[in-house]
Every structure is written in structure tokens, then in C-alpha cells.
Amino acid sequence: MTRSWMLLTLALFALPATAANLRYAEDQAPAIVNPLFGSTMAEARVNELLFDGLYTDNQDLATTPALAASGELSPDKTEMTITLRDDVTWQDGKPFVANDVVFTIQAMQDKTTLSTEAGRAAFIKTATALDEHTVKLKFARPESRPEDKLLFKILPAHAFAGTSVKRTDGFRNKPVGTGPWELVKYNEDNSVSFTTNGSYRTPVGLSEMTMREVSDKNYQAKLLLYESLEALVRVLPRDLAMLQNNRKVELYPYQTNSWWYVGFNATHAPYDDVNVRKAMSALVDVPSLLAPVGTGDLLSGPFVKSSPYYNHDVNPVANDENAAETLFAAAGYTKVGGAWSKGGKPLTVRIAAHQSLESAQEVAINLQSQLQSAGLTVNVEFLDDAAWKGRVWREHDFDLILSQWTFDRNEDVREQFHSQGARNFTGYKNPEVDALLDKARDAADPFVRKTALREVHKRVHDDAPMVFLWTLDSYAAMSVKVKNVVIHPFYFFTFATGWQMK
């Protein structure tokens, strides 16, 4: 990039901004704005701006009412009566009522909706509106703290024709929420403009926000330095020192509850053979994959290391080509001329990655190089949102996927690893893991839940449905003009109503 071209581009990005307009960057603009279908962190961040749940996190990450005013749990813990706030309106002026809650739950559970969030409402047996501001929930089994699971976003019933919601519904780019900001429009440069929801129940410090699509992650830091952005969601490690030494920028460290993985399609041969999965896992040099991306913790299972459910007695899979050769031989493969084959057919691998996943291209290409040097034939595909939903979620048309899971503080991995899980698109099945996940779900005693999930960690590790990679160290960067910044570790913008700008 020449200096003149850079200056021209910076000038184009430096569009007029009011004193309270915070401009932040995403690698790719959200493909859809509807909490029923969220699959990327860019979409989750927009959902935090536009929508509310019945409950939310306070700054201590403890559950606190949002759209709910109060809740009463029945003595047997199988029902909850929720009184809703009566001072909330939707951004189109319609009142927020109990039927909106009932509709959202039923839409999530409607099998024709194909919601990626369906599992979050699976614990609810029925939802009934008792009156305009009272909802009764009946649970499939006793729930000690159901409010901890009622963090999902609520949608307006009047904006949909029924509970069978489609990704293509007009709501996807004309959303209506109860949150602190409203979506004004998608702009021709793929940026998205937001303005304050004038009827929001508490003061909002920023009157405007603009999400700018900046696909080149390296370029985002330059835009911040040239004051064409006020916020970066995540700083590349190589930019940390540059930003830290700039007096116009403040860095904010935060912990994410997310982890990267390479997942095998266990429904297709040869990845239905645990020896093949373990052999390929042993060929992956995870520290070398991580080094160009940043720093973080290497993982051995489906929880982050700070989790009470992480089993520290289980070590990450070591890069061991000798072990891989033994496992490939056990699966019937031979190595001829440096290439692995079985029955005369070479082992050919297709790796799919979502093109909006930050640093996915760098990681996928490095992974391809590692596997090819070990004797595999590897092709890499970068899928857009529509192709990802179709190929991975619906058709299970992949060999390996490179992706990332992000969780709230409940760290519920049931949907990913239970044989009936809504997000278990790798086809992983283990009856013992199913039983442990059921036990953890039903446990009233936190110790019982912790013990069960630590055992899940161990057994999933042993079955190798995935190569568990890492959780990244994260830093956000803000212009010093932005004050009172508190960042939510899972969704980023949850506490943004208190942010202010000079």
C-alpha cells in the first residue's frame, strides 16, 4: 500500500463524526441481525446494542433483571413466574408485553426456524402469558437458578408472521429491539449506523455508533491512530506495542470465554475412526499455529483454563509424528513415497473455515502446510456465511473445520457434544458423555456439576472429535476520548451504555 493511497483511504474513513459518535471496526459486517441466527461475534456485538434479554450480567458477572422486573420460582423448582417491566417499548413504539417472551421461546424451539440458539431454550417445557406483564415458564426438569439461562435476547412478536422464522425474513436488516441503540441503516460502504434509542429506560452516553467494515486487520490499528476510528474490538499482538506507546490510545485487557478448534466430521469415513482422528491430531503443531496469531492458553478440552470445569490433569495433544504413524498404521494406512494412503487411495482432506473468522486464513494455510508436509493431501476452502450455514450446519459437507466457539459464563457445552445437541454438526457420539452431560444439566449441587463436566473434558479429549487449540489473550483499544469504558468479556458492548466521549 503506497503512502498516498493510504492517506486517501484514511480520508475516506474520516467521515464527519459528532462528539458522541463512536466508530468501531469489524472484519466483516454482520450478514444478518437476528439473535435467532447469530453465529459470529460481530453479530453478537450488534445484538448487544439492539436487544435485551429477560436477565443480563451486571459488572460482577452476576445475573440481574433486564426486561424482567422480578421472578418467583416454585417450591419444586419446576415453574417460574416472571413479572415484566411495564416501562419498556419496542423501538417502533409498540409496547413490550408477555407475548413477546412467549413468541421468542416458541420461535427458538420451532424446528422449522432452524435457530442456532435453539438449545438455549430447550430447558423450557412451556411458556404462557398470564397477562400483559406476567409470564409463566414450566421447565422440563427442576431448575435451581433458571434466571442464569434466561439471558437470550427477546424479539417482538408483532414483527413476525409466526414462530417459523426464516433467515431471509425482512427483520434481518430492519431489526426492532428494546436495546439502547437502534439500527439506522446499512451504508453503501458496508458500514452500519446506529443511533440512541430515545425511549431506553436508562441514560445512554453515546448518541451514535458506526460499525465500519475493515477486512484488513492490520489496517484497523492505523485507522485508530489516524483518529478515523475510536475503538478496536481486538488488537493484533504485533500492534500492541505501537498502540501502547501512543498517548491518544488506551488499551483494555479482557478475558474471552471462547476457544478455537479443528473439528472432524465423525459421520464420514475415515474420520469416524478414532485412530485417524488421533493420528491427525498428533500431526498438528499447535504452538506453531498460534505464534503468528497471538498469545494465549493451549487447551486439552472444551473449556478455557480459568473455568472450574477445565480438567488440568489432561494435557494437550503433543505434536508427535511417530505416534501419528503408529495410529495411521492401526487404521490400515501405509506411507508410500511420503504420502499416506489406504487401498491405493491417498488420504485427502478438505478444511473449511468461515471467512469472517479473524486470522482464519493464516491459521488454515499453516495447518494445511503442516498436514501436507506429514504426507496428507490438503485443500482449504474459505466459506461465506450462506455457504457455512449450508455446507457445515445443514449438509455436514466437510472433512475438517477450523472454527471458534464462544460461550457465556454458564459454559454449556451440551449442544456441541451431546449426540442430540443442536450444534453438534461434527456428529460426535458417546453414550457415556451423553449421560455425563445429562447429569451436569440436572445437577442442583455445583460440585456434582463440576465433577461431571471435568469427566466430560477427559472423555471428549480421549475421543478426539476435535483438535482443541487455544483461547486467545485479548486487548481492546480505545481512543482516550472514550471514557468510563467497561468491557464485557463475552459480548463486549453489554456495559456500553455507560461509555462517554469528550
Image (spheres, grey):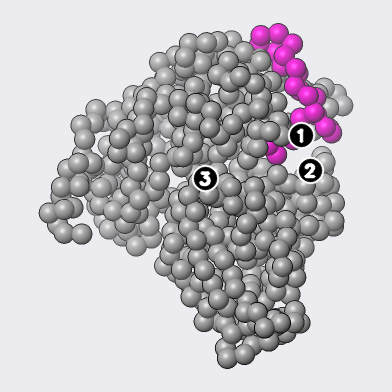
Residue 190 location (% of width, % of height): 34, 38
Q: Is residue 157 above or below residue 153?
A: above
Q: Secondary structure at mark 2?
A: helix
- The type of residue carrying mark 2 is Arg
Residue in the foreground of this view, choosing between 2 and 164: 164
Residue 286 location (% of width, % of height): 54, 71
Q: Earlier in the sequence, mark 1 or mark 2?
A: 1
The quarter of the image holding the C terminus is: top left
Residue in the foreground of this view, choosing between 469 and 103: 103
The answer to whether the residue labelled 1 contacts the one labelled 2, judged by CB atoms less than 8 Å apart, is yes
> What range is drawn magenta here?
117-142
Point 42% across, 24% down: residue:
182
Point 69% across, 81% down: residue:
342
What is the number of the mark on residue 441? 2
In the picture, residue 102 is in which quadrant? top right
Residue 405 location (% of width, % of height): 59, 51
Within-10-Å neighbours for mark 1: few <14, some 14–19, many 20+: some
Residue in the foreground of this view, choosing between 464 and 37: 37
Question: Farthest left residue?
Answer: 4
Q: Is residue 123 above or below residue 396?
A: above
Q: Which residue is mark 3?
A: 386
In the picture, residue 324 is in which quadrant? bottom right
Q: Which residue is mark 1?
A: 123
Q: Quick check: is 138 in the magenta stretch?
A: yes
